[in-house]
């Protein structure tokens, strides 16, 4: 057995995660060809690198198939009900910042707040005979947020990518998605509701609360935590 560390297998999150560990003397790298999803860990014994899709890391932590995992806080909160009973946040890594927000068309000049959206949603249903559609892949987080804000007259439309395009394509009236620079929202003529920020996310190192560990694994985990500067 060894400590299994799950890291995103591609893109900015992978590179910045490798940098973050490297700066702390733990060298992570992909081995083999660019397309081969295997990796290695140097600088500490007993830790195994598992390259995974960022979106699958919460599930793998929850199942105890990996002991540690790096992914966005948004994905953990979305994919795991009662996430804090399943995983523990060990360190915020300071990159991968993104805000989960609700946005509506810029030309909805009278709609700036969640209360405005609530009023529009009721009027929309009366006029069109169906509920206002909000496109998102963050179903759990959006439902929880809208319930807290008392908005009920809506339906979620699943969108796993290019979500900001759904309004122009007339498959949704509003979107709930992550934004970083805001460029995608602006390019698609959408504006964020002034109180429409649901969550601020960043890349975070998580520990699975239930992953099985032997005494030797606990020693390795303690050493790794010390190397990474985690209390
Ligand atoms: N434009 C962005 N700027 C900053 N962070 C982002 C951006 N887009 C996504 N993220 C963050 O990166 C993480 C991974 O996002 P996402 O699931 O879209 O990744 P992906 O590369 O498409 O992964 P997958 O392999 O699961 O398809 C999420 O936590 C998200 O908040
Ligand atoms: O505020 P910005 O800097 O413009 O970034 C926001 C965009 O980035 C993400 O998309 P991604 O590139 O992951 O593609 P996707 O549409 O397939 O999710 C997100 O879903 C937004 O579309």
Image (tube, rainbow, N blue to C red):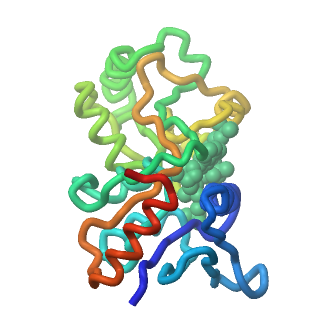
The foreground one among 170 and 128 is 170
The answer to whether 40 is drawn above or below residue 17 in the figure is below
**Residue 231 drawn above or below residue 144:** below
Rendered position, 223 above or below 84: below
Q: Can you name the residue that lies furthest to the bottom here?
A: 1
Can residue 161 be seen here? no
User: How many labels were placed on the picture?
Assistant: 0
Residue shown at 35% from the left, 80% from the top: 217
Q: Residue at 75% of width from left, 87% of height from top? A: 32
User: Of 71 and 81, which appears nearest the observer?
Assistant: 71
Q: Is residue 151 left or right of residue 174?
A: left
Residue 45 in the image, given as x and y percentages of width and height: 52, 82
Dividing the picture into quadrants, the one containing residue 168 is top right
Measured from the top left, where is residue 10 in percent x and y? Answer: 67, 67
Q: Which residue lies furthest to the top in this view?
A: 110
The residue sitting at 50% across, 71% down in the picture is 6
- State left or right for residue 29 relative to residue 204: right
Q: Where the N terminus falls, by quadrant? A: bottom left
Q: Nearer the viewer, residue 118 or 76?
A: 76
Whether residue 25 appears in this view of the structure is yes
What residue is rendered at 26% in x and 52% in y?
Answer: 84
Residue 17's place in the image compared with 36, above or below, is above
x and y, in percent, of residue 198 in the image: 40, 33
Closer to the camera, 211 or 198? 211
């Amino acid at each position: 057995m060894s400590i299994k560390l799950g890291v995103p297998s591609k893109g900015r999150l992978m590179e910045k995660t490798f940098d973050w560990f490297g700066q702390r003397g733990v060298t992570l790298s992909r081995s083999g060809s660019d397309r081969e999803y295997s990796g290695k860990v140097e600088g500490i014994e007993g830790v195994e690198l598992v390259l995974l899709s960022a979106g699958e890391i919460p599930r793998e932590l929850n199942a105890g198939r990996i002991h540690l995992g790096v992914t966005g806080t948004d994905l953990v909160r979305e994919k795991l009900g009662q996430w804090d009973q399943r995983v523990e946040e060990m360190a915020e890594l300071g990159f991968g910042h993104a805000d989960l927000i609700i946005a509506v068309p810029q030309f909805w000049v009278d709609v700036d707040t969640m209360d405005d959206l609530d009023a529009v949603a009721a009027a929309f249903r009366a006029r069109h005979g169906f509920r206002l559609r909000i496109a998102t892949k963050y179903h759990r987080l959006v439902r929880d947020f809208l319930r807290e804000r008392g908005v009920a007259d809506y339906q979620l439309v699943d969108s796993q990518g290019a979500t900001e395009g759904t309004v122009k394509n007339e498959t949704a009236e509003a979107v709930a998605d992550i934004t970083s620079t805001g460029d995608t929202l602006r390019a698609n003529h959408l504006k964020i509701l002034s109180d429409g920020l649901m969550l601020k996310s960043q890349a975070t190192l998580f520990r699975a609360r239930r992953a099985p560990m032997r005494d030797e694994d606990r020693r390795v985990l303690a050493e790794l935590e010390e190397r990474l500067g985690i209390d």
